[in-house]
Amino acid sequence: MSMSLGQLVARGDVLGLLRYPLAQISGVTVTLAAILSALLALGAAWGISVVVRRGIRRYGTLHPNANQASLYTVSRLAHYTVLVIGVLLALEITGIPVGKFAVFAGAIGVGLGFGLQAIFSNFVSGLILLFDRSLKVGDFVELDADLRGTVRAINIRATLITTNDNIDVIVPNAEFVNGRVVNWTHGSEHRRIRVPFGVAYGVDKEIVKKAALEAAERVPFTLTGDDARAPQVWLVGFGDSAVEFILAVWLNEAAARRNAAIKAAYLWELDSALKRHNIEIPFPQRDLHVRSLFDLRGADALAALHGTPSPVDRPVQTSAPAAALAAHERAALARNDAQDDAVRGLEEDAGADAARALRDTNTAAPGAPAAR
């Protein structure tokens, strides 16, 4: 004869309480003992996940040369795997076979198609990011002009990005999979920035180049020791009021994750270097040419307008001589950096094409002797 829950409580029958049927689900009786066992299994799974993640994190700390992004990926996958096993084990302990959820799976699928679509999409996108490795923890990424920062964590729903201003931004994982993302540190920690500046017309371009290279040397972020990545000065245009140049500089690893501050540092040194060489930084201006005034023309008309003596009556004044460069220094500065950079890139592309053609030839003729 079965007893009621109240009678079992009154008698203090603990074993009977644990075995008391609480609900019937598709012919399966759910007892308090089964529920407690399921909760214990879930807690054990969570504890194992914590221990595994701490062990992986400790391994990464003891081995700094290990791939930290790979360790993070293994940690997240281990966490998800242990939790899934724990949930399945809890269902079996409760007495609910997984096959009983076939009907519920259809309902869940309909729900995912409507209200849970975004959540499920972000979850799958997070798994894609972990497996694809196009985005890793520690990468410096740019989603748009206003969002740049370092990837701190790739979670189940969203990715945490910390900007250079120490602002945490939570971005849904689907945006990294469906949108365009600029990963500045995906293949290499080094990158090049281009700092535009302008000088007045008539200034010796070799002296401008010398001043710009001096400015680059004074900035500690400039990558040195590599001729292929040495600072370069390009003449890129003739504007309305200035001759336009670009200082192209490769940055070292420490500065590859900074943007506005690094560019401002180069502009600061550029201003100082140009002033040291007496190079004018122009501002927008317009010249008024007077063809005739009071039956006078040219310089005489302009002198009459200003009320100054005619050029004929004024003593001739000579301007200060421009800064002189040694012959060898001018020859070195006269090199066209933009042209050299383009030629180097073309040579690298040609070498890659030649290697690809050689590989294709060896693949097409496996019996042919290897090229020497």
Image: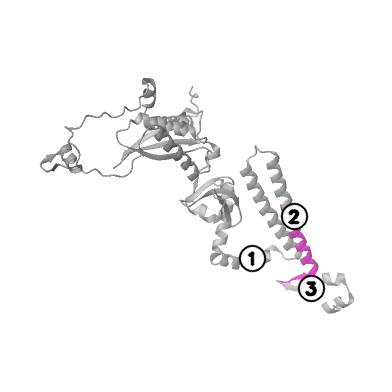
Q: Residue at x 74, y 60 (%)?
A: 42
Q: Residue at x 22, y 29 (%)?
A: 316
Q: Residue furthest left?
A: 295
Q: Earlier in the sequence, mark 3 or mark 2?
A: 3
Identify the residue position indicated by label 2 in the image. 47
Relative to 225, 106 lies left or right: right
**Residue 21 colored in magenta in the image:** no
Counting from the top left corner in percent of width and height, residue 109 is at: 58, 65
- Report the amino acid beneath label 2: Gly
Relative to 59, 158 lies left or right: left
Is 100 in front, or is 109? 109
**Residue 29 colored in magenta in the image:** yes
Is 288 in front, or is 310? 310
Counting from the top left corner in percent of width and height, residue 284 is at: 31, 45
* Prevailing secondary structure class for the magenta stretch in the rendered image: helix
Q: Earlier in the sequence, mark 3 or mark 1?
A: 3
- Report the amino acid beneath label 1: Ala
Identify the residue position indicated by label 1 in the image. 102
Using the numbered discs, state the Cα–Cα distance from disc 3 to disc 1 in whole angstroms: 24 Å
Which quadrant would the N terminus be assigned to in this image? bottom right
- Report the amino acid beneath label 3: Pro
For the magenta stretch, what is the residue range? Answer: 26-49
Q: Earlier in the sequence, mark 1 or mark 2?
A: 2
Numbered label tally: 3
